[in-house]
Amino acid sequence: MDETSHPRYRDNEDSRFYKTDRLSPEETWRALRDELGRVLLDAQRVFWRGRLEMDPERVRWWHGAIFARHFPHDGGRFRRERAFFGVVTDRGGMRQIEGSPPHVLRQDLAEVCAAFNTGTAQLDRQGIGITEQTRVVAALYAGILRVHPFADGNHRTAFVALSAALWSLGLPAVEFADDKDMTHHDSTVAPALFSPHGDVEPFARLLATRIELARKAAT
Amino acid sequence: MENGSHPSNGKRDVAQIARAGGLVDPTPQSIRELADSAMLLSQGAHRAIEMRREADDATLDASASAAAAQD
């Protein structure tokens, strides 16, 4: 029996990953959840305290690993059309953001990845603070979300990058499970999405706080 | 706890997961829960919270119907 996912969960009807030809929307949700779990399991085995060299192909590969088995046409394919996505504002409203134009999204993603690689290389020194580490990770996560390289599934792919990046730095992955966690996540990521030079500090601080609190609770 | 979440003392050198209640080791179950929360998070907090509420309400309704049927 499935002990975690609620049997009624299903993706948004507008999503390309709402349902496969052979599965119901609810079965599709659980099948993709299982694929995402496999990718995360692999990521923690491969990248724990290891070098994570980011590039657009890795991001594309993760998307394919999550989605291509059930959606071979869309999994692992960069989009070729414009994309818009909603971001919460600090007044509780919603603002539409456009992802990178299709003809430059690979280049924009390459810049996000290069900034992460440079940033992590500069962390290789003693006495580095946790927020300095989460700042680099937060910029990678927000960068993938902002470029929005895929028609759908950007968030799930970015979450794999987020978790792999944290593990590669020897930090725990962060789970946003309850209502308050998810609301904090959205409100702190939003400022980083409004422009290519958006503010990653709120999300970097949230990651650092969540890690420190979990460590404290564990001792 | 072969498949369950392993509470940690915070000093283990393994890839862990930070939750509200502390750190857990990566097991098939804890990774599945991480994936499940990421699936919900991908819907946006507003929709995710709504989905969870509707699912919980449906479960309660089903339980109440089952209990009434046994009366």
Image: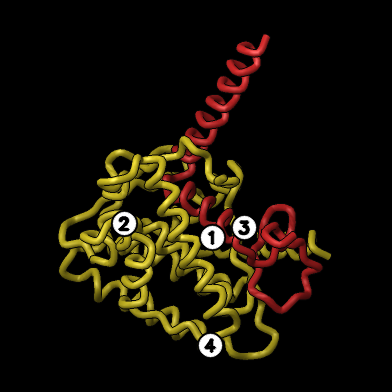
Mark 3 element type: helix
The amino acid at mark 4 is: Gln
Q: Which residue is mark 4?
A: A122
- Comes first in the chain, label 4 or label 1: 4
Q: How far apart, in angstroms, are the residues tagged by discs 1 and 3?
A: 27 Å
The answer to whether residue A197 of the structure is visible from this angle is no
Mark 3 vs mark 4: give the one in front.
3
Which quadrant of the figure contains the N terminus of chain A? Answer: top right
Q: Which residue is mark 2?
A: A70
Q: Which residue is mark 3?
A: B29
Across and down, in percent, residue A80 comes to 16, 62
The amino acid at mark 3 is: Gln
Q: Chain drawn red, letter?
A: B
Residue A136 to residue B70: above or below: below
Label 1 chain ID = A
Label 3 chain ID = B
Mark 1 vs mark 3: give the one in front.
3
Label 2 chain ID = A
Instruction: State the residue at coordinates (54%, 47%).
Output: A182
Mark 4 vs mark 2: give the one in front.
2
- Comes first in the chain, label 4 or label 2: 2
Q: Which residue is mark 1?
A: A203
* Side of B38 relative to A176 (left or right): left
Quarter residue A59 falls in? bottom left
Residue A42 to residue B61: above or below: below
Mark 2 vs mark 1: give the one in front.
2
Same-chain check, marks 4 and 2? yes
Any mark on residue A143, and which? Answer: none
